[in-house]
Amino acid sequence: MALNKHIYSTINHTADLGILVYGRNMADLFENAATAMMEILLEPRRLEETDELSISVKAEDLNDLMVRWLSEILYLFMGERRVVTRATLKSIGPSNLDATLHVATYNPDEQEVRNEIKAVTYHQIDVSPKGTEWQAKIFFDV
Amino acid sequence: MKIELKQLDDYRWLIPKTGAMRVPGMLFSNEKLIKSIGNDPCLTQVANVAMLPGIVGHALAMPDMHWGYGFPIGGVAAFDPHEGIVSPGGVGYDINCGCRLMTTQLDANDIRPFVTDLVQGLFRDIPCGVGSSGNIRLSNKEEAQVAVQGAAWAVKKGLGTAGDLERTEDGGTIPGADPSALSERAMTRGRDQLGTLGSGNHFLELQVVDHIFDSQKAETFHLFEGQFAVLIHSGSRGFGHQICDDFLKEMTKRTSTDSRYASLPDRQLIYAPLSSELANRYLSAMACAANYAWANRQILMHWTQQSIMATLSLTPREMGMRLVYDVCHNIAKKEVHRVNGSEMMLCVHRKGATRALPPGHPLLPKEYRHSGQPVLIPGDMGSYSYVLAGTHGAVKQSFGSCCHGAGRVLSRNQAIKKAKGRDIRRELADSGIVVQSRGKRTLKEEMPEAYKSVSEVIESVQGAGLANKVARLRPLGVVKG
């Protein structure tokens, strides 16, 4: 499966791992950030979706919203062994969002973990409009 | 922010107090390592830490310093109990990531023919890899017991001895751990990860004591040249990661409307005043994670011993495995230090830094009161590790702290690029090191060239008077997740 390199690029960080994510609008950005994180976490595979989850995230501001959003998706994998294959934003504001997560059950025999992401950090977090698009800088603790 | 550096002597560099810094920064390093920092933002991070309320003395960085998130890796900072703070980012997600060194009475020359078998056996017997679950599945009640008792829980289960606890930092248990401060998510993640090595820079390494620098201290630590030894590097696994994450978010929520926090140079430095209920709750949750990590390393040690004995058909007496010491290098602790002539209880944060207590310190077990605390410094996968002994110089200059490893110079992506087309496993084998790892990328990400020279780091530590060399160990075999 091809990597979604058109929606994000990696930032060199000595100990950890950073990404710059791009989106046409806020919702697109948050969806792309989820895709990017899952791609960094796991070797891309076509998986059979087993479930659909509705999720609401509330935060203090947009930067916090991105950290909490990705943390929810990360917890699904790290805590419950469920892989988010697709994320669809239903609504998004400066400090809250509602989304549908399409998930599959993780099979370690079929899909290799590429990077152990311990957490989504607040380090240099920056979610902001850039011209006509949106961009997010996010660092993960690996 | 351009950081001015003023060289004080061969091993000390000052970042003068400027702008919003409340104290100066102090770096312990030699000139070669300082030059190698280049554009790495760790110096800015030292200056950022110096802006935190109630910081005492200097914001410090050890010779293995490099870019972290919030605090630099290799960062140490101590805070006043009344005006100061605790910052989960100053401890890190892998709470009580640390090392333990075990010796044996075996000669490494007798072990060499069996290293491949040993590594394969350990790879089979020690659960490792990303998110790996182990052979222990805890009930909620048991998990709470682990969180409170730490390494003592494992010893009670027959997975160690009382002597192991004496030779573990803090006896393998930080008091005041409160499982009611933990989220359900933390409990879920910790349920089946006890007794797992982890991945990334975590490892289990078979070693030979390659050189003795201080024969008297080596004898106290039960080290001899040519000895077969084992070093384990692991932490609190998903349990600790979740606890840090939970409290960073709670502190962010609690402080979002407070103007004092608006000027934080990095949100990862979010904090709670030490006098607050939130700070105390974080510290009691952090203690749970620290205790879990000590239990984890205690169990890993026991299973390592079992695996080696099985492969070599040895009895415990024939193997003679003994814990030298266990140190943590991501922690915040309340410690008594002398500040301006008076003793004060400070909250000392070590983020990729190791405690290094001097001879005579009351927190040391009796057998180490004369020598000082063993300080364990792992190198990268292909090179030496060191055992040092803590000094009074560390207490005077760095709140009893020292470096924790070699420190990275390349990002993971840079390391993977540099390793393209190379067989790192073969290169290490050609150097006499057998490696087995679970992740395909791990070996490339952790290749020796990704790290500073540990020998330069150790030379700087000794030159600055923070700790003195006792022994050097060389790898024979490595298990990585």
Image (cartoon, coloured by chain):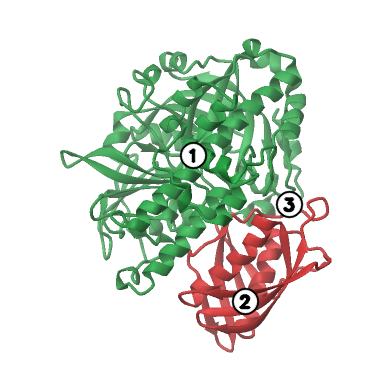
Chain colours: A red, B green
Name the residue nearer the viewer: A8 or B322: B322
Residue at the far front in the pictured view? B141
Q: What is the chain identity of the residue bearing mark 3?
A: B
Q: Is mark 3 on a helix, strand or loop?
A: loop
Q: What is the chain identity of the residue bearing mark 2?
A: A
Q: What element carries label 1?
A: helix
Name the residue nearer the viewer: B84 or B199: B84
Mark 3 and mark 1 in contact? Answer it, CB < 8 Å: no
Disc on res. B420: 3
Name the residue nearer the viewer: A99 or B110: A99
* Number of residues whose C-alpha sits closer than 10 Å to that of mark 2, classed few (under 14), some (14–19) or many (20 or more): many
Which of the two marks, 3 or 2, is nearer to us in this view? 2
Q: Is residue B305 above or below residue B192?
A: above
List the residue tagged with mark 1: B291
Measured Cα–Cα span from mark 3 to mark 2: 32 Å
Mark 2 and mark 1 in contact? Answer it, CB < 8 Å: no
Which of the two marks, 3 or 1, is nearer to us in this view? 1
Please, what is the three-letter code of the amino acid marked with disc 1? Asn
Horizontal placement of B422 versus B255: left or right? Answer: right
Disc on res. B125: none
Quadrant of residue B51 in the image?
Answer: bottom left
Q: What residue lies at 39% left-to-right and 72% top-to-bottom?
A: B256
Q: In this view, does B15 lie above or below A86?
A: above
Please, what is the three-letter code of the amino acid marked with disc 2? Phe
Which of the two marks, 2 or 1, is nearer to us in this view? 1
List the residue tagged with mark 2: A30
